[in-house]
Image (cartoon, coloured by chain):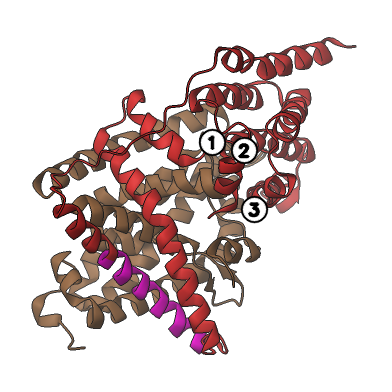
Amino acid sequence: MTTVHEVLERSGVTPVHIAEGYLPVTHAVAWSAAAAPFIVHGVIRLNRQIQAAPEDKLLLGASGAFCFVLSALKIPSVTGSCSHPTGTGLGAILFRPPIMTVLGTITLLFQALLLAHGGLTTLGANAFSMAVAGPWAGYAAYLLTRRLGLLPAVFAGAFVADLTTYCVTSVQLALAFPDAESGFTGALAKFGGIFAVTQIPLAVSEGLLTVLVVRLLRTSAAADLIRLGVLRKREEVPA
Amino acid sequence: MLAIDAAAYRSPWRRHHPAAKALLAGGLLGCALVLPPWPGAPVTAAITLAVALGWARVPPRTLLRAARTPLGFALTGSLTFLVTVGPDGLGWADGGVRRAADVVARCTAALLCQLLFAGTTPLADTLPRLTRLGLPVTLVEVAALIYRMLFVVLDTTRRIRDAQAGRLGTRSLRAAWRSLGGLGSAVFIRSFDRARRLEAGLAGRGYTGSLSVAVAEIPLKTRFLATAPLPAALAILTTLTLQSLP
């Protein structure tokens, strides 16, 4: 009998959440300030949604728990290694980016306090990459490719959200630790290079996993997908 | 239950107010981030470790297991400081080892402070008190709901995984992918189903949108509160003393 936490611990893969104390104080504060308007916007939307339909509060709680568990799943990567999906692409498609920003930030706080993945002072930086940039970029990719069909759009959304998260993390690290000789550009090449080896295959894996999940949801939870505005009535597949 | 949260529930500091523990761990965290990495970070790390293991009695195994992954991130990330990208390609960076050591030391000290707080304070004690810091009630309520549902969803995930493994669902790469897709969708469906049943149960009890939860009163003990800033003060004093040595 294994727990998800044990599975997560045994995977031996370092998450890309920036660890506590890794960023200099000024950078930690600046990224928190950058993420704050998006989080405030998300909280306003969340408030409005709950005021309009108080029963949604419980569904949002379930959605947040689902996002946390999704990011704890171990997925086989194309290169043969294993890692965890960010889950932000699927979250943004299902619940829209502003709500996902709030759920993602809460998930990051819980990951910091329950798993020590990410930190409290680096919460702003991690929230900006994983709960703001990833969901918005993923959702934009999903909308742009939606006319190709649900599943290709879901793949594009999850792939772009995952990759954007890691690209923004690379930028954050390069800004904090510029290369001694070539400055920001050299540091970006170094951090981007390290992440690219694992994250491009992982982004493909996350895209494939998200497609599998949505394909199954299309047959077994079509009503929920229609209610969330992900599935159109004519796209429903009989179970 | 997750290992850090379980340790927090069993902690002898469980009955201390979260604000006092936040002051203690926050003070040390401030030292880890603001003091010069040498000798500030090792001094802060040593004091935090002594407080965590000796005073708060956080299980060393929990501490070690929790620290492994973030330290892996710090070490991997710091490898980039050893090389530099110049016009001639990659080369060894001057002072790269020192820079990497600075970051890893600061990161280790800060991580221990984070684990000191997390390993002694259950989230269930912290969340309801966040409204006093000015956070919106709706946000705190949703966070508390996520926390409560989290363990049920984690348990559901574990059961489905075990059932899939028992049916040879991880035998091949193809089967593993199919199982993972099934797991993700099943967890989604069951989470939503559970939320709906909870909602129906609450509606039957006159639910209007407010989820009032009884929060256990934890008195703010003056003695603990007075001693809370001392470890940070000791870290500052020791660092300054060591720095002034020739």
Q: Position of residue A97 (x, y in %)?
A: 26, 52
Q: Which mark is residue B7?
A: none
Q: Chain of mark 1?
A: B
Sequence order check: which comes first, mark 1 or mark 3?
Answer: 3
- Do labels 3 and 2 touch, CB within 8 Å? no
**Vertical order, B189 against B205 (above or below):** below
Q: Is residue A21 above or below residue B245?
A: below
Q: Is residue A38 visible?
A: no
The amino acid at mark 2 is Ser
Q: Give the percent coordinates (x, y) of residue A202.
A: 50, 69
The chain that appears brown in the image is A
* Magenta span of residues: B174-193
Decide if residue A139 is in sight here.
yes
Residue B121's label in the rendered image is: 1
- Check if residue B244 falls in the magenta segment: no
Q: Chain B appears what colour?
A: red
Mark 2, residue position: B11
Give the mark nearer the N terminus: 3 vs 2. Answer: 2
Category of crowding for the residue at label 1, using alpha-carbon neighbours closer than 10 angstroms: few (below 14), some (14–19), many (at least 20) = many
Q: Provide the secondary structure element on which disc 1 rests.
A: loop
